[in-house]
Image (cartoon, helix red, strand yellow):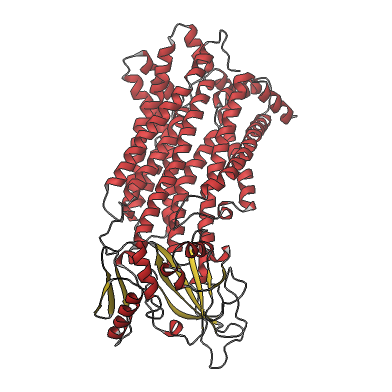
Amino acid sequence: MNLGLTWRLLKGGGRKGMLGAWLTLGAVAVSTALLLFAVAANFAFADRADRSAWRNPVAAPAQPAGAAGAGGKAVAVEARRHDYVRGEQITVVDLAALVPGAPAPPGMPRFPAPGEVWLSPALSELAARLPADQLARRYPKPAGVLGDEALVHPDELVAVVGHRPDAPAMTAERARDWIVGSTPVKIDSFAGEPTEDSEGYQVLALIAGVLMVVPLLVFGGAAARLTVARRDQRLAALRLVGATPGQVVGMTVAEAVIVAFAGALAGTAAYALAVPLLARIEIGGGPWFVSDLWPHPLVLAGAIVAVPLLVGLSAVAGLRRVVVSPLGVARRETPPALRAVRVVALLAVLAVVPTLTQGTSVAIIAVVIGLAFLCINLVGPWVVGLIGRITAASARSPARLLAGRRLVDDPRSAWRTVSGVALTGFVAGFLGLLTPGAFTSDAAADQLRVTAPAGQVAAVAEQARQRLEAAGVTATVEPVKDTVVAALGGGAGEDVLDRARTALAGLVPGRTPTTEADEERFGVQIFADIGTGTIVVLSVSFLVAIASAGITAASSILDRRQTYGLLRLAGTPLEVLDRARRAETLVPLTVMGGGAIAVGAFCGIPFMVTSVNVSGLVTLGACVVAGFAGVVGAGALSRPLLRSVTADPAPRPD
């Protein structure tokens, strides 16, 4: 019975009543789509880490001589190094079988035989496109193409090279720097561990996820409170005519869940359509497999269930006044003022921030950042109420007085309008300090270097001269301590550099000739990825903020349409009402936006890796400008709705 009555009340609210339901549906759809993206991104980085783990194998347990090949014993030798072409990194995995029938690496139908080369699709295509003396001769006669299971991302350049166990490439000492490569390791399977760079990206993804998810949860909860005044009036009337508290709660939950479930389905569909576009975002060296960004069915089901549940719980949380004092709601009494104890919670969380360091557990960091987010949302309505009292007391115009009184009367509603931008200010303040400047370097890119075995520097240098001369590459080759340096002449371009790399390939088994720029490439990439991640997080935050401002601004007008209509009938000019509405938004936005930026910057100080840079300040300034522009624009879009509700000759709440 309650469900039928709820449906009739929902449909019977008129055109503007249904508009409120559509606003709620839109808010839930935006929240669901962006929530799926934030969660899927973390799973995507985990999937990448799993696919790269086979390149970072765990050493097999030591076994007695002659026992290799039994279960749990070494079956292969694996080593990893990095090569380069056109400034891009190639991951080269050297493999040698220790027993017949060794298990195949991921993405390969069988173990590579000695002398065989398997290339990733992107590397195979590049080798076919470039002249042979610039790339293909390094990996002659490829035997096959690696499957997706072996790749971190679709455009990754990977080569798997087969060797004999006693080949120099599998026995020679290599550099122990994980950025350069890894030494040969005897393994019993390809079940390795995520590489250090993969783990680093997962940590960054978790922090970014918190920065995106918390505002989304706040926005999703606020979606349940849209058109709250209209709903309270209607439910209070039902209570006064005999409806029980249980019936009121049941109808509220049913109405909220019906709308939220439809919104969750719409948001899921929107995310599904956006996945191919999102997969083009390049982080960690390349784009994504579409399957990485498509959440697990349990995650999808959880979002479709959890979002409506959150909206339903949030709707019920706002019913205390209706259930306890329906007459007070019907008479439109001003609710009790919020308590300052909310501020204490925020100060307690901020007191913990200085104790955090870059070595603190990422889980603890994520929890503290999340709590700071939630506490800003908790303190927001109290501060808005305080701003309203100050604004009303200092008002020198009818518009300012109306704005101040509205802030005092309903600070929660005013906070919902600006909360999205305020929370985005927290994100901008946090990331503004952490965003590093562009990683620049004057490292030489025309000098190839390779470390020679002890006592063989002169012989290796002579071989390098001969190889480069045979390849037609002009270079000056000199031994420098234990390193052979080949300085390419004539301001070598990419084609000459790659010809030289090809000529020197295999000069020292297990070692790749590299430039100083090659060795700094990881730093360049990680800094660029942090910048890309910052843009993505801020883009999501601003989508939430602008959607929140626009939807809640329109909802606020619907909630107060009776008040606006009566004021208009009493002779209040429409322009005064519009100025009051703008002041009601911009005054708390200025205070809370600035405060949230300051809190975000304070939380980011312990994790700064560089001094404050121009790039971070520009990002922060752009966020402030975009935030204000978004709220002002959202307010302007709702002005026709204000004109419409004030034109009603007989204004009523429903």
Relative to residue 156, is residue 597 depicted above or below?
Answer: above
- Tell me the quarter of the image containing the N terminus: top right
* Front in this rendered view, residue 16 or 602: 16
* Front in this rendered view, residue 322 or 7: 7
Q: Residue at x 52, y 54 (%)?
A: 288
Residue 29: image x %, image y %?
Answer: 58, 37
Residue 382: image x %, image y %?
Answer: 41, 32
Residue 492: image x %, image y %?
Answer: 30, 64
Q: Can you see residue 341?
A: no
Residue 15: image x %, image y %?
Answer: 62, 19
How many numbered callouts? 0
Relative to residue 55, is residue 637 depicted above or below?
Answer: above
Q: Residue furthest bottom?
A: 65
Q: Residue at x 38, y 22 (%)?
A: 583
- Tell me the quarter of the image containing the C terminus: top right
Q: Is residue 474 left or right of residue 541?
A: left
* Front in this rendered view, residue 361 or 44: 44
Dividing the picture into quadrants, the one containing residue 204 is bottom left
Relative to residue 443, is residue 214 depicted above or below?
Answer: above
Q: Can you see residue 652?
A: yes
Q: Residue furthest right?
A: 1
